[in-house]
Amino acid sequence: MGASDKKIIRKHNKTVDKIFELETVMQGLTDEQLKAKTTEFKDRLKNGETLDDLLVDAFAVAREAARRLLNLHAYRVQLIGGIVLHQGDVAEMKTGEGKTLTALMPTYLNALDGRGVHVITVNEYLSKRDSEINGEVLNFLGLTVGLNLRSLSKEQKRVAYSMDVTYTTNAELGFDYLRDNMVKRFEDKVQRGLNYAIIDEADSILIDESRTPLIISGGRQNRTPQYLAADNFAKVLNRDEDLEIDLETKQVYLTPTGIKKAEKTFSIKSLFDIQNTELYHLVLNALKANFVFKNGVEYVVQNGEIVLVDQFTGRLMPGRAYSDGLQQSLQAKENVEIEQETITMATITYQNFFRLYNKLSGMTGTAKTEEEEFVKIYNMRVIQVPTNRPLVRLDEPDYMFANRDAKMNAMLEEIIKLHEKGQPILIGTTSVESSEIVSHYLQKANLKFEMLNAKNHEREADIIAKAGEKGAITLATNMAGRGTDIKLASGVQELGGLAVFGVERNEARRIDNQLRGRSGRQGDAGFSRFYVAMDDDLMLRFGGERLRRIFGRLGTDFIQSKMLTRAISNAQKKVEGMNFDQRKHILDYDNVLAQHREAMYSRRDQILTVNELKPIIKKMQYSAAYDLTRMFGNESHGEWFINYDELIKGVDGKVIAPGTLVKEDLEKMNRNEVAKHLSNLMYDFYLARINDVPGEVMIQIERNTIIMAFDNYWTKHIDQASKLRSGIYLRSYAQTNPLHAYVEEAAKLFENMQIAIAHEVVIKLANVVVRLVDNNEQPLQDVEEEVREFKQKG
């Protein structure tokens, strides 16, 4: 633990002393008196006190309520963790230190101001479990608790979000946010703002998952034949001659001979010609699908579908798909039905979504190695909270082998030795594929074991809870079962506690630490060791030739060396750095879109909530009028000339009353005055059209018209921005900074989008026809195609 952490912990300890001092007072209260504290706290907030002022008293109340209802009495370290969470930082607490109870205190305190607390977990099982355990205490103290599940109706979701505390998963929360910004009426939203979040397994959600954006899509385009053609082409290539595969970055490139083959196969002159960009993209995806992505590692095929596997937890991610056509390339490779591609209608990365909260906090067993990222991206420190009892687990140095077979046999020997004396064993693997290999070895040795991977994660919590029983052997991908404690059965302590074997090192040190941390909870005995071979993924990517040669001479022997363990740590640091850069890179680009998104969403909210839209329409009419002076004009020697005859012909009788725009008047005005005059005429024309329509009918029509234009063009904007982004890297060849180029071009796209929206609204409203049927107002929008003519000129 660093010096700054120690200083923070010392300060928090003083606060905890004050909470402890209230213990006897709290225990002396009746249930009714304890419940009444909530009202007292709410009154104190109304009278100008802050949440910080209430911290000591509120923590003491929540602690006492948990003691009465759950029979759990928060330790000092859990109170420290709670303070860290309240301050908007990440509390790093080892496995088994009781994170669920730790979160209760800051949840209670922050729910007192009524703005809502979101407690976020990685899956619905954990959300449900935590909402039941902590919900009992919060309800007892007079707060309301909601559980937001994927299966709920909009109405049920709205109720869940209206509670003081809402338990939910990260994916559902993000999708609800995006869906809320697609509603046609403000009251159809389910969320009521993003105030304070506590994220369980914060590293998993804020770091590992932040590479895949959340996407809501609609609209279809079918390119099945092209995918099959690209896939067939990929399958006839020679891996050694036609391809270059960079394992480090997981990229595939065509060599000159591969490029020639492509040009011959698709009968084109040059693969890199601008009109072949789509084809090139398809081919690259097919190469990735066939040569980099493996069934059982990145995805599994289930019931004729490609289901993605979370690289860090080994869990299946139903409903998630790769974007940019990669999903379709995998479907072609595995010969399952190719889905039609969709158009992205709304998208956000977890990074940008969670930065929308007023206050964000998180807890996890392992985050210190990624502290730089937490600080830079989320402005959260990572505070290491000490363990309640000293950690006595033995973490042995790695055993290093020449190849996988030697490694597996040596590990098996060790497993059999420990199994014979009844010590429980947990074996961690990095992928579904590698756990299948290990299970094969275990079956050959006639060992009985439980297997936990992406294919049976419904039973995850049951299997992992039993992993501490005598003689149990549990085989799990990486972080399966995260969030469930492994409690040791009686007599296991004396045998040395839970033994953890890592079958290979993970890309990130953090994940290795998580696997180790399954053992040795709350001062239990325990043991861990990693077995590493030169043909493991990580070693193939970063091991280097020299190491391989040294190890080639080993045969079935192994080396145990601190220096090599350090070398592996350095390789992992390198991958962590690369992954951070990649996420930072995604974020830099997404930040541009985030500014656009926030501007659009807040304007959209304004349109849905204001009672009078005429001022907004007036502004749009001016934007459209000014743009018409551009369309029907040109610049010469720094002066702007407008072709008045063309302008009048373009708008007369369409968006202004016939004959009202007079050339002689216009010739006396400058460009701004022309635009102002034209927009006034547009406004008069519009008012005359709707003269006899009741106000409440008209505001509905106006609102629908503007919102439809907004959503239509925003969808196009996202699509254009993503196309711009995928092609922007070519700029680096022209010595320009791709990101700078992207920022500038995206700003132009955004401006054009706003002008396009203005034109659309002006045209639609100028042509609105409202028919009154039997005194029952039926708004009918009748938009004629010909009025788009002058838009085409632009």
Image (cartoon, helix red, strand yellow):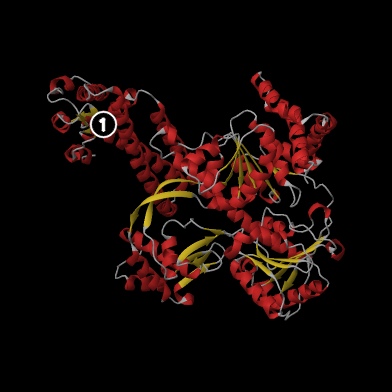
Across and down, in percent, residue 122 comes to 60, 50
* Vertical comparison of 483 with 491: above or below: above
Q: Residue at x 40, y 50 (%)?
A: 217
What type is the residue that disc 1 sits on? Val
Whether residue 192 is visible: yes
Front-lying residue, 64 or 545: 64
Quadrant for the C terminus, please: top left
In this picture, residue 321 sits left or right of residue 129: left
Q: Residue at x 80, y 34 (%)?
A: 16
* Vertical comparison of 291 with 662: above or below: below
User: What residue is disc 1 on?
Assistant: 762
Q: Residue at x 82, y 62 (%)?
A: 497
Q: Residue at x 16, y 23 (%)?
A: 661
In this picture, residue 692 sits left or right of residue 211: left
In this picture, residue 96 sits left or right of residue 283: right
The kind of secondary structure element at disc 1 is helix
